[in-house]
Amino acid sequence: MFGRLRLDGEAVAGGWVGVSSADGTFGRHCALDFEGRFRLDRVPIEALTLTIQFPVDTRRIVLAPTLDLSPQPDQPLELELDWHSKQVNLRVLDPERIGIPARVEVRGPHLVASLETDQDGTAKLVVIDSGLFQFHARARRGLEGEAEIELDVADDLTSVVVMVARPEAANSD
């Protein structure tokens, strides 16, 4: 299996590509080169999941989807991943509407990820797929909250605010 990854027209260098079987009996990974290319040899002919880990970027967190692959006998598996992204500004606010650091679980199309916000409750995210995204935040003192938004990578910048409260306070409405 071989391929190339581009994000918004730029080669992604320095990240990792991993492939694993559904039953967990096979797993391999390799680095992306400076042109975003990768190669994984001796990949079995069975259902596989491809994951991408982007290089660490202190300005933003890239939430890459997973891809389900079905290699065929005697056919090389070549992937040209030319992805376009959308920036999402995330903010977690406490009941007094003050930014609060939190761990946020994000679920979306082909995506389950977890991240931490800054001390002021903010994070800049990059998503690849369009669709419905759910954000579940957990902060100190037992505060929790959720938000849901439909994202389209063709749209402009989007912001998501998650209001956190004590679970019993949220259920008393």
Image (cartoon, helix red, strand yellow):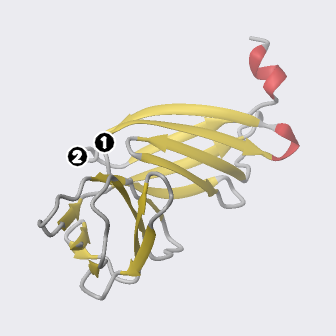
Residue 169 spot, x, y in % from top left: 81, 21
The three-letter amino acid code for the residue at tag 2 is Ala
Which of the pair 65/20 is nearer the observer? 20
The circle on residue 160 is none
Find disc 2 in the rendering and name its residue. Answer: 154
Tell whether 40 sits left or right of 18: left
Please tell me whether residue 122 is drawn above or below residue 141 in the rendered image. Answer: below
**Residue placed at 31% from the left, 42% from the top?**
130
Residue 161 spot, x, y in % from top left: 57, 39
Please tell me whether residue 17 is drawn above or below residue 143 in the rendered image. Answer: below
Residue 2 spot, x, y in % from top left: 22, 75
Which of the pair 155/142 is nearer the observer? 142
Quarter in which the N terminus is drawn: bottom left
Which of the pair 25/78 is nearer the observer? 25
Label 1 environment density (alpha carbons within 10 Å; few <14, some 14–19, many ≥20)? some
Check the image and name the residue furthest to the right: 141
The three-letter amino acid code for the residue at tag 1 is Ser
Residue 135 spot, x, y in % from top left: 56, 39
Tell whether 166 sits left or right of 15: right
